[in-house]
Image (cartoon, rainbow, N blue to C red):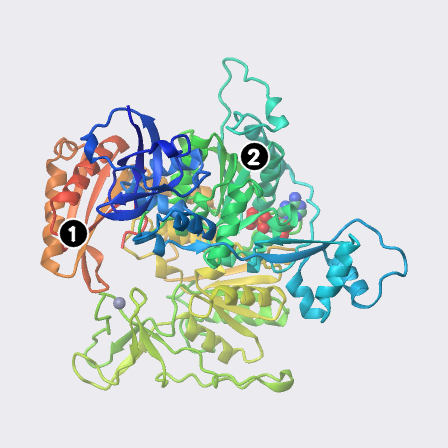
C-alpha cells in the first residue's frame, strides 16, 4: 500500500487533498510540516495533516507525489495542529486559511535549500510567503574572568566597565559610543574578558529598555486563595507529551471517587484588585512544573505597563507578540517558542496560535473585551478558543475580568468554569470610587456653554485641578462633530458608499494653541464652528473628503456641525480650563508609539485632563487619577444589538475603575438622560453581580445567548437585488433542511443588516438560533454546501458562528 499524506493547501476549501509520499521522504514527512505540492498545475505550499499507509480512496493514477519537504521539523506541533483543525470545523472555516493563522514565515535557508533542489522553479505562492532570517546581530557580554589590575586602559577598560554595569549589549550600540569599539572588543575577547556571539535578537520596542526585577508582593487572602486553587489545578495536570521535568513525575494519583479538579477558572476581581499578581503567580507555578504559559490581552499596544510587569518578574524569557513586530522579530519570537527556548508568550488575539511548548496554562485578561473576536477572515473568538485549546492540551485556563462576559458567567453556572473572586482593591488605602449620576435632563450647561459639560462636571474638574490631581473624560465618539446636518432641510450628510453619517474631523491644527514659552498659560483658542481645513470622514470605510459648502439635498448654505466628539471635547475643555494641560487619546492621535507616549505622560503627571474614547478605559493603573467623567453614557446603549446593555455596562465599570486606585479617593460622574437604565444604575452602584443576574434573566426571556446559540449568515453584494436574492435562498434552504423543518433551528430573516450598505455593498443577513449546538451545526453544514455550489457568484456569504458584531 502506498504511503499517503493528507495535505491542506491555502485555498478556500474545507477539505484536505491526498498526495503520495515519495520513498525518499518516507519517515521525514510528518504532520504539521510544510510541503510543496502540485495543485492544478501550480506548486503550492501546503501543510501535512496526517500520514498513513492505506489504499487510496480515489483513482491511484490521479494521486501526485509530494514535490518537496520544507520543514525538517514540523512547523506546527501536534497539539497546535489538532487544535487548528478543531477550530476550522467549529467555525466552518477553510482549513488552509486557519492554518495560515499559525504558520511562521519561511526562513531564507529553507528557500535556499529548495532552490538547490530545483523545486522552486515556477512556484507562484512561495514568492508571496514572507521570508525571514539570514540577518544576525553581534552581541558582547562580560565574562566572569577578572583582569590583571592595571592591564586595561582607554576604551577597552571603558567598554568592559559598561558591559559589567549594564549587561550584554549589541556591538552596534557599543560602537555608537566608542569609536574604537571593534578593536577594544577584540582585545577583550582575546583575554576572555568578553564573549562575542551572533544572534537574531528581538529589537522590539517592548524590549528596548531593561526592566528591573521586582520583588513579588505578599498576596492578600483572596489573591492567595485564587493562586492556590490555580496551583492545585496545575499540580493535577497530566504530564504533557514531552514532559520530562522531574516535578511532573512526582504527581500523586487522584484518589478514586474524588471529583476531577476544575481546570478552567473565571477570575472575577474588581478593578485594581490585583488580578495581574495572580496571573504572575500562576505562570510561576506553571513554569516550575516545566510547562509553558500563554497570556492573552485585548490590545497590547495599550498595555506596555502590563508587559513591563511580566518582564520585571520573568526577565526577557518572554515572547511578546503584537501587530507592530517586523517580520524578522515576529519570526524570532516564534522560533524561540517553537524551539523551547522561551516558554511564556504574551500577546493579543492572534497569540492564541503561539507554539508555546508543553502548554500548561492559558490566561485571558479582560476576557469580556470585544477585541478577542476576529471580525474578518476566519471569524474566531479567541476567548472561546482559549478554553478549547487549553482543554485539548490538558492545560489550565484562567479568564480574568472585573466585568465578566455574560457567556463566562453562564459557564460558571453550568459548572464549566470555577469562580475565583477578588472582592476588594489590592492597595490597602484604595477603595472603589464614589459614583454619582448627572441627569442631563435636569442640569444645564456649565460655563463652557456645551450642554455635555454640565455644571457638576465643570465644578468637579475645577476641584481636581485645584488639588493637583488628574481627570479622565470618556466620550465614545471620535472626531469633532459626529454629524453634519442641513439647517434648512434637515438632511444628514452620509457616506456615498455606506449608509452611515459622516463625521467631521477638524484634525490637528498647529495654530490652535501656540506653545507658550516659559510655561505661561496659553490663551484659549476661539472655538470656531466652521473652521477651514477639516475633513468629513466615514468611520466604516476609508472615505475622507472636504466639508461641502452647501447641502447636497436642497443646496442651502446652511450646514451645521452637530454633536460632540473627542476632538471638540478636547478643544472645549482646553478653552474652559486654560491653565490645564489637556490631551486626547483616541484612534486618530494614537499610532502605536503615540498611545504609549500619551499614557506615559499621564503617568508622569504631565497631563491634567485626558480626554478619550474606549482607549482610556483599558486597564491602566494611573495612581493620581481621582476624577473620571463619563460625558455621555447613553451613546452606546441605544444600538440595535442584544449586547448593547452589557457592553455599555462594561465600559462604565471599566472607566470608573480608573479612578482612585491609590490612597486618594476617586470620584466618578456619569452623565445620562436615562439614569434608570439598568446598565447605568448597576454601574453606579458597583453592582456587577446584580447586573449579570438581571442581564442573564433578560437574555433568557428574549432567547439570546447564552440561553441560545446563534449563527449569523452575512450576505453582501454590489447589486442590492443579488444580495437580497441570495439571502432569501439561504433562508429558504435553512427553513427546509431537517433542523429547520423540525424547528430545532429557528430561522430569522432574511433582513437588511442594521448598517444596510457598507463599502458600496448591500448587506443582508439570516440569523439561525437554536437551544443546542448540534442542530445548529447540522443546519450550517447544509447551508455550507449550498454556499459552495449553489449561490449567485456575485453574492458573498460569510458564516459567523457565535457572532459578536450584530451591526
Ligand atoms: P487589576 O489587574 O485587578 O486591575 P492590578 O494587578 O493592576 O489590578 O493591581 C492594582 C494595584 O495593586 C497595582 O499597583 C499592584 O501593584 C497592586 N497590588 C497587587 N497585589 C498587591 C498586593 N498583594 N499587595 C500590595 N499591592 C498589590
Ligand atoms: Zn463609508
Left or right of 656 on screen, residue 559 = left
Quadrant housing the N terminus: top left
What is the number of the mark on residue 122?
none
Please state the horizontal and vertical placement of residue 7, each as a whole percent of the image.
Answer: 31, 38
Q: Residue visible at 39% across and 51% down?
A: 115
Q: Residues within 10 Å of mark 2 (few under 14, many from 20)?
A: many
Residue that carries the numbered disc 2 in the rendered image: 291
Q: Residue visible at 34% across and 35% down?
A: 49
Q: How many marks?
A: 2
Left or right of 604 on screen, residue 748 = left
Give the answer, above or below, for where 737 lies relative to 716. above
Q: Residues within 10 Å of mark 1 (few under 14, many from 20)?
A: some
Please state the horizontal and vertical placement of residue 395, each as a whole percent of the image.
Answer: 49, 32
Left or right of 110 on screen, residue 763 = left
| Residue 93 visible at all | yes
Of callouts 1 and 2, which one flags the residue occurring earlier in the amino acid sequence?
2
Ligand 2 resides in the quarter of the picture at bottom left
Residue that carries the numbered disc 1 in the rendered image: 751
Give the answer, above or below, for where 288 lies relative to 685. above
| Residue 404 visible at all | no
Q: Is mark 2 within 8 Å of ligand 1?
A: no
Nearest the eye: 601 or 100: 100
Quadrant housing the C terminus: bottom left
The kind of secondary structure element at disc 1 is strand
Q: Residue furthest right?
A: 149
Viewer-nearest of labels 1 and 2? Answer: 2
Cα–Cα span, label 1 and label 2: 49 Å
Q: Residue visible at 12% across and 48% down?
A: 791
Amino acid at each position: 500500500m502506498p504511503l499517503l499524506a493528507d495535505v491542506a493547501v491555502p485555498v478556500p476549501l474545507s477539505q484536505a487533498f491526498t498526495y503520495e509520499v515519495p520513498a525518499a521522504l518516507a519517515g521525514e514527512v510528518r504532520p504539521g510540516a510544510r510541503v510543496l505540492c502540485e495543485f492544478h498545475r501550480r506548486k503550492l505550499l501546503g501543510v501535512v495533516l496526517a500520514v498513513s499507509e492505506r489504499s487510496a480512496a480515489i483513482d491511484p493514477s490521479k494521486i501526485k507525489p509530494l514535490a518537496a519537504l520544507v520543514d525538517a521539523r514540523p512547523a506546527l506541533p501536534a497539539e497546535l495542529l489538532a487544535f487548528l483543525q478543531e477550530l476550522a470545523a467549529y467555525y466552518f472555516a477553510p482549513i488552509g486559511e486557519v492554518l495560515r493563522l499559525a504558520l511562521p514565515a519561511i526562513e531564507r535557508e529553507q528557500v535556499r535549500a529548495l532552490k538547490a533542489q530545483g523545486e522552486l522553479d515556477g512556484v507562484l505562492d512561495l514568492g508571496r510567503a514572507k521570508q525571514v532570517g539570514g540577518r544576525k546581530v553581534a552581541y558582547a557580554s562580560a565574562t566572569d574572568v577578572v583582569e590583571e589590575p592595571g592591564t586595561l586602559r582607554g576604551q577597552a577598560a571603558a567598554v568592559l566597565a559598561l558591559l559589567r554595569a549594564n549587561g550584554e549589549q549589541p556591538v552596534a550600540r557599543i560602537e555608537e559610543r566608542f569609536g574604537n569599539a571593534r578593536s577594544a572588543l577584540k582585545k577583550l575577547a582575546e583575554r576572555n574578558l568578553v564573549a562575542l556571539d551572533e544572534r537574531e535578537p528581538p529589537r522590539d520596542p517592548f524590549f528596548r529598555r531593561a526592566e528591573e526585577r521586582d520583588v513579588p508582593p505578599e498576596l492578600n487572602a483572596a489573591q492567595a486563595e485564587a493562586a492556590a486553587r490555580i496551583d492545585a489545578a496545575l499540580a493535577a495536570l497530566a504530564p504533557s507529551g514531552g514532559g520530562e521535568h522531574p516535578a511532573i513525575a512526582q504527581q500523586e494519583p487522584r484518589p478514586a471517587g474524588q471529583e476531577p479538579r476544575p481546570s478552567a477558572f473565571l477570575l472575577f476581581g474588581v478593578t485594581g484588585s490585583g488580578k495581574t499578581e495572580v496571573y504572575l503567580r500562576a505562570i510561576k507555578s506553571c513554569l516550575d512544573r516545566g510547562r509553558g504559559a500563554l497570556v492573552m490581552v485585548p490590545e497590547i499596544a495599550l498595555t506596555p505597563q502590563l508587559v513591563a510587569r511580566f518582564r520585571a518578574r520573568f526577565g526577557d524569557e518572554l515572547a511578546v507578540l503584537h501587530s507592530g513586530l517586523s517580520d524578522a522579530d515576529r519570526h524570532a519570537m516564534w522560533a524561540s517558542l517553537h524551539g523551547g527556548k522561551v516558554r511564556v508568550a504574551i500577546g493579543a488575539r492572534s497569540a492564541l496560535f503561539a507554539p508555546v511548548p508543553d502548554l500548561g496554562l492559558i490566561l485571558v485578561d479582560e476576557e469580556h473585551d470585544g477585541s478577542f473576536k476576529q471580525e474578518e477572515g476566519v471569524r474566531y473568538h479567541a476567548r472561546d478558543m482559549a478554553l478549547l485549546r487549553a482543554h485539548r492540551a490538558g492545560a489550565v485556563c484562567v479568564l480574568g475580568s472585573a466585568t465578566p462576559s455574560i457567556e463566562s458567567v453562564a459557564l460558571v453556572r453550568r459548572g464549566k468554569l470555577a469562580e475565583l473572586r477578588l472582592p476588594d482593591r489590592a492597595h490597602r488605602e484604595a477603595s472603589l470610587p464614589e459614583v454619582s449620576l448627572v441627569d442631563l435632563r435636569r442640569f444645564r450647561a456649565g460655563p463652557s456653554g456645551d450642554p455635555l459639560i454640565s455644571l457638576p462636571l465643570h465644578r468637579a474638574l475645577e476641584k481636581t485641578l485645584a488639588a493637583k490631581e488628574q481627570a479622565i473624560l470618556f466620550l465614545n465618539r471620535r472626531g469633532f462633530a459626529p454629524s453634519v446636518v442641513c439647517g434648512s432641510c434637515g438632511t444628514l450628510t452620509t457616506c456615498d458608499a455606506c449608509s452611515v453619517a459622516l463625521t467631521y474631523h477638524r484634525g490637528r491644527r498647529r495654530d490652535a494653541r501656540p506653545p507658550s514659552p516659559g510655561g505661561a498659560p496659553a490663551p484659549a483658542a476661539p472655538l470656531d464652528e466652521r473652521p477651514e481645513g477639516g475633513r468629513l470622514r466615514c468611520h466604516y470605510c476609508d472615505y475622507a473628503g472636504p466639508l461641502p459648502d452647501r447641502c447636497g439635498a436642497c443646496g442651502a448654505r446652511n450646514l451645521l456641525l452637530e454633536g460632540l466628539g473627542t476632538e471638540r471635547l478636547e478643544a472645549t475643555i482646553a478653552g474652559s480650563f486654560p491653565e490645564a494641560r489637556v490631551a486626547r487619546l483616541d484612534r486618530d492621535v494614537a499610532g502605536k508609539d503615540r498611545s504609549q507616549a500619551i499614557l506615559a505622560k499621564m503617568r508622569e503627571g504631565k497631563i491634567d485632563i485626558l480626554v478619550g474614547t474606549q482607549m482610556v478605559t483599558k486597564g491602566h493603573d494611573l495612581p493620581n487619577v481621582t476624577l473620571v467623567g463619563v460625558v455621555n453614557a447613553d451613546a452606546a446603549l441605544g444600538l440595535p444589538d442584544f449586547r448593547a446593555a452589557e457592553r455599555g455596562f462594561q465600559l462604565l465599570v471599566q472607566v470608573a475603575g480608573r479612578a482612585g486606585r491609590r490612597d486618594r479617593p476617586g470620584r466618578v460622574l456619569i452623565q445620562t438622560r436615562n439614569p434608570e437604565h439598568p446598565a447605568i444604575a448597576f454601574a453606579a452602584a458597583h453592582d456587577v453581580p446584580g447586573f449579570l443576574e438581571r442581564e442573564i434573566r433578560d437574555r433568557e426571556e428574549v432567547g439570546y445567548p447564552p440561553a441560545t446559540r446563534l449563527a449569523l449568515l452575512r450576505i453582501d453584494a454590489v447589486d442590492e437585488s443579488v444580495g437580497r436574492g441570495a439571502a432569501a435562498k439561504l433562508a429558504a434552504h435553512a427553513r427546509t433542511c431537517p433542523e429547520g423543518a423540525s424547528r430545532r433551528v429557528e430561522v430569522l430573516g432574511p433582513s437588511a443588516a442594521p448598517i444596510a450598505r457598507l463599502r458600496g455593498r448591500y448587506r443582508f443577513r439570516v440569523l439561525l438560533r437554536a437551544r443546542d449546538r448540534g442542530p445548529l451545526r447540522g443546519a450550517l453544514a447544509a447551508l455550507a454546501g449550498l454556499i459552495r455550489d449553489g449561490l449567485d457568484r456575485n453574492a458573498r456569504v460569510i458564516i459567523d458562528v457565535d457572532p459578536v458584531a450584530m451591526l
